[in-house]
Amino acid sequence: MNCQEAIRQLSDYLDGELDSELKEQLRRHLAGCKDCRLIVDTTRKTIEIFCNTEPLPLPQPVRDRLMRALGAKFASNR
């Protein structure tokens, strides 16, 4: 497995959805590739941080603009 193939499999790897053969190939690649290990670790930490935070409320002016834009978009699709 090369770096490009490893990156393609990253999402499934982090989600625990790789079959055992691909998972082992990726683990072997990561054991010898510092750059890909860094990408995996950074991505994993980013996901953990994102999942463990509360969403911030939208300021009312932003919420109003968003609702107007969505209303206009849905009205134009009818």
Image: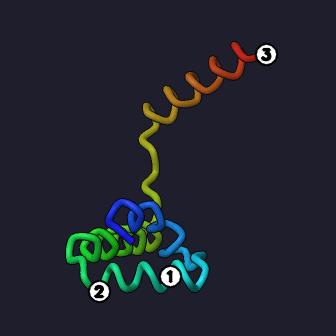
Mark 1–mark 2 distance (CA, rounded to whole Å): 12 Å
Residues 37 and 57: in front is 37
Q: Residue lying farthest right? A: 78
Q: Residues within 10 Å of mark 2 (few under 14, many from 20)?
A: few
Amino acid type, callout 1: Lys
- Disc 2 or 3, which lies upstream in sequence? 2
Secondary structure at badge 2 equals helix
Mark 2–mark 3 distance (CA, rounded to whole Å): 54 Å
User: What residue lies at 56% left-to-right and 23% top-to-bottom?
Assistant: 69
What is the quadrant of residue 27 in the picture? bottom left
Mark 3–mark 1 distance (CA, rounded to whole Å): 46 Å
Q: Residue 31 carries which label?
A: 2
Q: Which mark is residue 53?
A: none
Q: Where residue 16 sits in the image (x, y, percent)? A: 56, 79
User: What residue lies at 47% left-to-right and 86% top-to-bottom?
Assistant: 24
- Identify the residue position indicated by label 3 in the image: 78
What is the quadrant of residue 52 in the picture? bottom left
Residue 9 horizontal side relative to residue 67, left or right: left
Secondary structure at badge 3 equals loop
- Identify the residue position indicated by label 1 in the image: 23
Q: Where residue 42 sits in the image (x, y, percent)? A: 29, 71
